[in-house]
Image: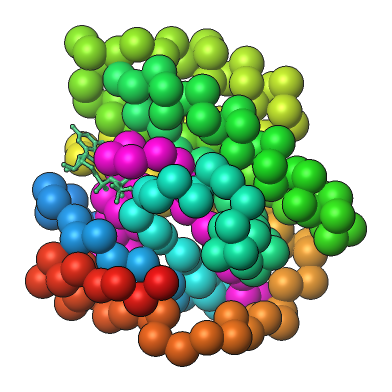
Amino acid sequence: MEANIVVLGTERVGKSALTVRLLTRRFIGEYGDVESIYSHSFAVDGREVTLNVWDSPYSEDSSGETSLFEKKVQWADAYVLVYSICDRASFNSVGRLIQTIRSAKVYLNADKAPIVIVGNMRDLHHRRTVLSEEGRLLALNTDCHFYEVSAAENYHGVLMVFHGLVDRMKDAKLTTKRPLGFKGIVRSMSAVFARRRTDSF
Ligand SMILES: Nc1nc2c(ncn2[C@@H]2O[C@H](COP(=O)(O)OP(=O)(O)OP(=O)(O)O)[C@@H](O)[C@H]2O)c(=O)[nH]1
């Protein structure tokens, strides 16, 4: 099984931290503004699963309808929408993202693509402005799944987010990887560690 996953959310909510945690098990603190697709393979019930995870720095177009944003939505088989539990605006934007994704997918006749809502930075509970119940309620009302995690402190929680998505996609036939149609988007992990800034788009 091969599946494409897009990680979305407003700025500095921990999108790269979650992605890098999944890939390397490490939390490195600061991450470059690198637009990247990473491939990650692991075994589930004896079958190899490959996830192509698209992580991008936040920009205004992440909540809009630009062609790059639409391309991401179309490319993805599933979505990880991240907010920070210390940032109410980032939580509010998740609701809007769900609507945008769902309308695009309805248009594409693929509106059942799983969406996971992730409240990150759980370790900063003393600065919390979004209650767990609010995240859970949003997920319930929008037929999404919900996790609260700390990319900084816990690898297991991050793993659960992505493995949970795999469980939901297992029965779907996601064996065909759709081409992106442009080159130069795949960056190596070394680009993240080197904090290299790119202007590929
Ligand atoms: N305390 C804490 N800090 C975190 C956590 N996750 C990420 N951070 C920090 O939050 C900041 C932003 O993290 P990033 O992963 O770069 O966030 P992003 O959403 O990719 O940001 P953009 O690229 O600007 O869109 C960094 O300083 C991280 O170290 C977490 O779980 N706990």
Residue depicted at 30% across the width and 20% down the height: 86
Q: Is residue 157 something that shows in the picture?
A: no
Q: Is residue 107 above or below residue 151?
A: below
- Location of the N terminus (image quadrant): bottom right
Identify the residue at image location x=63%, y=51%. Answer: 65
Is residue 4 on the magenta stretch?
Answer: yes
On screen, residue 132 above or below 45: above
Q: Quadrant of residue 107?
A: bottom right
The percent coordinates of residue 114 (x first, y second) are 69, 48
Residue in the image at 28% along x and 66% along y: 34
Viewport quadrant of the C terminus:
bottom left
Is 135 left or right of 100, judged from the image as shown? left
Residue 71 in percent (x, y) is at 62, 66
Magenta segment boundaries in residue numbering = 1-24
Residue nearest the observer in this picture, 55 or 161: 55
Q: In this view, does 47 lie to the left or right of 147?
A: right
Q: Which residue is drawn at 51% across and 23% down?
A: 92
In the image, taking residue 2 as reference, residue 107 lies left or right, namely right
Q: Residue furthest bottom?
A: 183
* In the image, residue 112 lies in the stretch drawn in magenta: no
Residue 124 point in image, percent of width and height: 21, 21
Across and down, in percent, residue 24 comes to: 25, 64
- The quadrant of the picture showing ligand 1 is top left
Report if residue 32 is visible in the image.
yes
The quarter of the displayed image where residue 140 is located: top right
